[in-house]
Image (cartoon, helix red, strand yellow):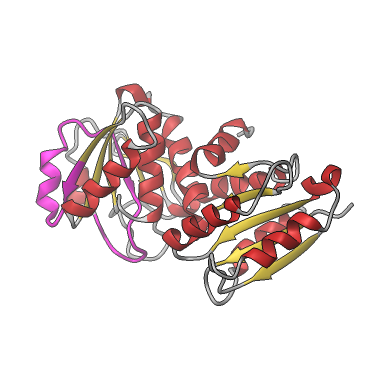
Amino acid sequence: MKKILIQLDTDAQPSTFDRVVAIDAGVDELMSYGDITPENVTPLVHGAMFTRGAKDLHHTALFVGGSQIQEGETLFQRVQELFFGPVRVSVMIDSNGSNTTAAAAVLAAGKHLNFSETTALILGGTGPVGQRAAQLLAKLGANVIVASRSEERAQATCDAITTVVQGAQLKALSLKDHKQIEAVNQDTNLIISAGAAGVKLLPAACWKPMKQLKVAIDLNAVPPAGIEEVDVMDKATDREGVLCYGAIGAGGTKMKIHKAAIQKLFESNDLLLDTEEIYQIGVDLKD
């Protein structure tokens, strides 16, 4: 029986990136729909639920995507509400690539750091990837500083993470000036830059003096670099004693995780793949 993936995208045009990855992951048939909302998704989900017998439901799966993570999360929740008993299919959410990218960044850092002894600074920490990287790091025992231009948004992100990660060690930081990095540079071992594309968040003059810094990860693939002097191709590149990863350097792992997650959807009909589940898929992959 063919493996069918139904792509539910909150944008008007379904992501070509997600479509290509799905095909490369071995999906037999891909059905892509755009402008999907909680109000119009019901017949699409019911079509996935009621067209195959119980023993064959694992051959159908749903993928929630799009550029707007909050809309994606609302849609992901609505999809789950439509299931009942054993009549359901597996669902993955990766709006804006947030879960797979965050998982790849944390896995890269974990090759070099003991998270229980790590203080991590997340630049762009209130964005889709930043929030999920902060959640994963907090779950793994790191002290996490969520930085944003707005302390209110940074604190809201910290509060949201504490509702899903018991005992999370989080701090909100309003970062309106590069000089404010000095407030955390005595303890910071890891920096992940997850801000908007093409925006320099951290000059080299700010991160190079950080004596405790061990790993710097810049997830911005569009020039200029989010962390100055970290190259997009860096993959554990030693730059004056700091191991650096660029967007493409970490991107190979992101792609492996994305494909493996799509493949896992068809192992059973009751999987819900969100941040922590997708990270675990990355952990289980052979490097």
Q: Nearer the viewer, residue 184 or 62?
A: 62
**Split into 4 quadrants, where in the image is the C terminus?**
top right
- Quadrant hosting residue 109: top left
Residue at left 34%, top 22%?
116
Above or below for 117 versus 69:
above
Residue appearing at x 89%, y 52% in the figure: 1
- Between 148 and 104, the residue placed more toward the observer is 148
> Could you tell me which residue is drawn at 74 percent across and 64 percent down?
30
The residue sitting at 64% across, 71% down in the picture is 33
Between 2 and 47, the one lying in front of the other is: 47
Number of numbered discs present?
0
Can residue 228 be seen in this snapshot?
A: yes
The foreground one among 165 and 286 is: 165
In the image, is residue 185 part of the stretch drawn in magenta?
yes
Q: Percent position (x, y) of residue 157?
A: 29, 47
- Direction bottom: furthest residue: 12
| Residue at far front of view | 84
Relative placement, left or right, of 140 versus 159 is right
Question: Residue 39, located in which quarter of the rendered image?
Answer: bottom right
Residue 166 placement, left or right of 273: left
Residue 193, horizontal then vertical, whole percent = 32, 50
The reply, left or right, for residue 233 in relation to residue 21 is left
* Residue 238 in view in this figure: no
Vertical placement of residue 260 versus 149, above or below: above
In this picture, is 45 found above or below 125?
below
Whole-percent x, y for residue 73 in the image: 48, 55
Q: Which residues are magenta?
A: 172-201
Residue 81 highlighted magenta (yes or no): no
Report x, y in % for residue 15.
58, 68
